[in-house]
Amino acid sequence: MKTEFRDTGVLVNTPPPRNGNPTSSPSPDPVAKSPVADALPPLLLFEHASKWYGPVLALNQVTLELTSGITGLVGANGAGKSTLIRLATGQTQPTIGRVTVRGVDAWDWRARELVGYCPDHDAFYEDMSGRTFVYSMARLCGFDRAESRRRTEGVLDRVGMTDRADRKLRGYSKGMRQRIKLAQALLPDPELLVLDEPLSGVDPVGRQDLLELFRSLAGQGKCLLISSHELEELEKLTNHVAIMARGRIAAVGTLQQIRDLMEDFPLSVRVDSDRPRDLARRLLEVPDVIGCDISGDDAGGSVVVRARHPKRFFQTFGRLVVDEMIEVRGLEPLDDSAHAILGYLLGGSGKT
């Protein structure tokens, strides 16, 4: 038994040869599998995992548990995302702690058979066609020729590359390369998919296709961990995120759950009103308000108010506008998004 991470940038398992016999292969659809029982161990589990690279602590006491569904992984450059991905996909081992896939050490080949990995960086054999590359990856996964061909055609169709698969990889656009990387990740019908920037370079139509594919895979009970800088697209896909900062998991949950935990951080809200100056003057008397910016005039305009303790602020705000008979024409939180949450947690602008 041998497991390698080859120069292609593709996670490759080389277990004993597998044939196309129905008793030893997945269902006819290469990416279809019944949801697993709840009694099984978590698909991905980090238990107090830390990783040093020489004197550098890249990951610090991370505990994280993922089951089925889609989880977004966000964080600033250097936050530890790449190290977390390398540990989850069995490319490296934690210095201390444990990382398991379905209860099996992630470094073990049996765990890697459950994982599909789509890396961020490309390292293709450029003279190969897309179809030949995916077929080669299937063979390296241990499937016989017939099963490798079947799975290759299945995953190429799934990512929309069937009609372009015979072109040389050197002539592929960035979006086409992303699709081919995703195709090889789907070959073993993995329970866990780790996707590093899968939407990078993909055109808007292609993005929509991939988002629908990700939702379909999650609907089959698979677990998808998606690292992405495309936070707007990520928010369309899932509101469940793990936010990394300085080698730690800063927060895990839905965006709203994370917001609820951030009572000490300021919330920015734009309020459109018929009397913006009167509204701003009264808001500044509210203890939770730390500042107001006014635009417009007495005939109408808006106030951007920054306040702590959002729930308490909105309760006070509701009473204030009723008591003062101030007309509110519009109300919009300006930072209830992954960008703002990330910015708050990292103490910066939210850029990743």
Image (cartoon, grey):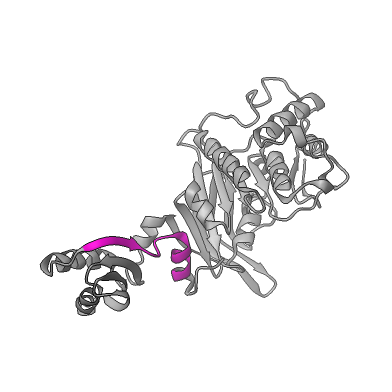
Left or right: 105 as drawn, with respect to 169? left
- Asked which quadrant contains residue 191, the reply is top right
Q: Residue at x 33, y 67 (%)?
A: 269
User: Magenta stretch: residue 39 in it?
Assistant: no
Residue 34 rendering spot, x and y as whole percentages: 53, 29
Residue 147 rendering spot, x and y as whole percentages: 75, 26
Specify the farthest residue to the top.
22
- Asked which quadrant contains residue 112, the reply is top right
Left or right: 46 as drawn, with respect to 106? left
User: Magenta stretch: residue 331 in it?
Assistant: yes
Q: Is residue 105 visible?
A: no
45 lies above or below 162: below
111 lies above or below 82: above
Q: Residue at x 44, y 70 (%)?
A: 344
- Asked which quadrant contains residue 294, the reply is bottom left
How many marks can you see?
A: 0
Left or right: 301 as drawn, with respect to 111? left
- Magenta range is 328-344
Front residue of 281 and 285: 281
The C terminus lies in which quarter of the figure? bottom right
144 lies above or below 224: above
The N terminus lies in which quarter of the figure? top right
Residue 98 rendering spot, x and y as whole percentages: 58, 55
Specify the farthest residue to the right.
127
Specify the farthest residue to the left.
323
Front residue of 240 and 93: 240
Q: Residue at x 88, y 45 (%)?
A: 127
Front residue of 88 and 259: 259
Residue 37 rendering spot, x and y as whole percentages: 48, 33
